[in-house]
Amino acid sequence: MLARFLIGFVAVLLFLLESEFAVFSPLQLGEGIYYLIPRFLILYLIFLAIYYSRKKAMIYGLIFGLCFDVFFINIIGLYTVLYPVICYIAAWCVKRVHPHLVFSTILALLLMIVFEFVVYEFFYMLQFTTMALQPFLVNRLVPTTIGNLLFLIMLAWAFKYCLSARVFQRAQ
Amino acid sequence: MPHFSNKKLIILLVSVIFLVALIGFSLRDRHNATLPEKIIKDTVGFAHSLVAKPANYITGIFSNIDSLLNTYEENQRLKMRLEDFAVLKAEVSTLKAENSSLRELASIEESLRDFDPIQATVIARNPDQWEEKIILNKGTADGVEKNMAVMTSRGLVGKIVIATPYTSEVELLYTNNENYRVSAVVHDEKNREIHGLVEGYDVERNELLLKRLDSKVDLKEGGKVLSSGLGGIFPKGILIGEITEVTTDDFGLTKMAYVKPAADFSMIEHVIIAKRKTISVDGSDGGSTNEDLVNGPADENEGDE
């Protein structure tokens, strides 16, 4: 019971922290301006989908995606759909193989890059941004990937502890 | 590949159609929140304001340490400016007195400069940063309304685009929105007023664009750009920034200037929302429509700033 509560609480906390960490961006280093986009929640949800429960991860994705859409971007349906879909893909990828922690970390990172790219294409199509592909890759995707990798390593560590303590079995 | 049964396929198709409809619906009118949206915004906003307090405290400690390190150098510079400041202050107070007595003589009561300040704290910032937006902890319950100017102690940062009862959303000056205009004024060396519009920004230089300036005027770099209050929404005299370069615009008909914003956009914590005292027109700064004058097409212009 406590473990289940904790899983939800961490999700809420990460959702709130994302926007607090966004304050540090954009970084101006020398000539270039670099954007660091915190993607803590989706990385956490990918891990939940792999190790805990696909269905619950998707439900969390739906709720937080809806909150994100309404609160931040005023277009309902973008994150609301993307969060659960990413969770679904993550769970589908590990259906047949036993998910080793290193494998899931790389998978989470790849899915985050895909996620970032889809969001970019969406905003580019709607002409909310005029950023070309190359500046997007250099100024946004690479710093974002590096920044989130740090978080991902900590997350993987926490999951390693949780898996050995069988937190997820108890929660189910 | 996952195997789909007929029933699942139908559910999938229906939800895709529903999704497209939902996105289309929310894209159509992004500047007015419906009731369920307002409820979600207020609830999430409340949670954010709980987290924002300790987070602001921690970032406050870091910026304090940062400013401590520069104290000596800063002190030297400030001492030099302090003497000028005393002279300037005396001058300002005499000018103010003169201004008010002249106003009395001319019986002008209201000024475009007057505004009621509403203090607000930033509780969240759009993490995906495709649209530059911040969210404040004051809403319509505190008198905040759409289109009000938002500034920090250093200068203008943006304007309110959506206000719910307990939160409000600010679109920053750094935006790709072409309809976002602020009517601005620059004083040249002879103290003449030069009017223009701040619209859009240059991504590469990270500076704002001041457009539609008369091609005959002689603008100098370093000129201070202020809001003019003539757009009908913003109060007059809020500092926007400083001119860094003057060029001609794309068509060669008018001049254009690059403006370095006075406010620091990366770490905004406390802001002032300016509620203009003079009657403000409905619509938006630079694209104002007065409903009494134009009843029909008012809808089209809604949301432009």
Image (cartoon, rainbow, N blue to C red):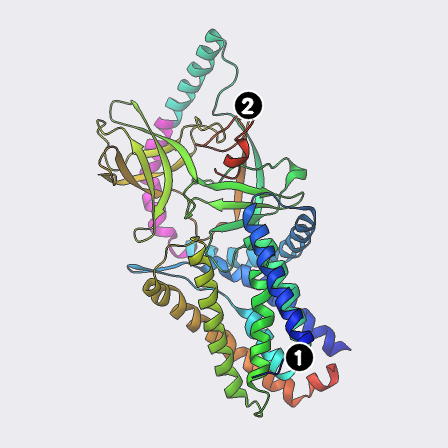
Q: Give left or right: position of B234 versus B213.
A: right
The answer to which of B261 and B165 lies nearer the viewer is B165
In the rendering, at what x and y percent does residue B119 appear? 58, 40
Q: Give left or right: position of B195 versus B16.
A: left
Residue A74 appears in the picture as rendered: no
Vertical placement of B215 versus B251: above or below? above
In the rendering, at what x and y percent does residue B211 appear? 32, 36
* Chain at numbered mark 1: B
Q: Residues within 10 Å of mark 1 (few under 14, many from 20)?
A: few
Identify the magenta region.
B68-88
Quadrant into which the N terminus of chain B falls: bottom right
In the rendered image, the residue lying farthest to the front is B6
The image quadrant that residue B143 belongs to is top right
Mark pair 1, 2: CA separation: 62 Å
Q: Is residue B216 shown in magenta? A: no
Residue B211 appears in the picture as rendered: yes
The answer to which of A159 and A48 lies nearer the viewer is A48
Q: Secondary structure at mark 2?
A: loop
| Residue at 60% in and 64% down | B16
In the rendering, at what x and y percent does residue A96 appear? 58, 91
Vertical placement of B237 versus A65: above or below? above
The answer to which of B34 and B74 lies nearer the viewer is B34
| Main secondary structure found in the magenta portion | helix
Residue type, label 1: Ser
* Chain at numbered mark 2: B
- The residue pinned by badge 2 equals B279
- The residue pinned by badge 1 equals B5
In the rendered image, the residue lying farthest to the right is A1
The answer to which of B86 and B273 lies nearer the viewer is B273
| Residue at 36% in and 58% down | A131
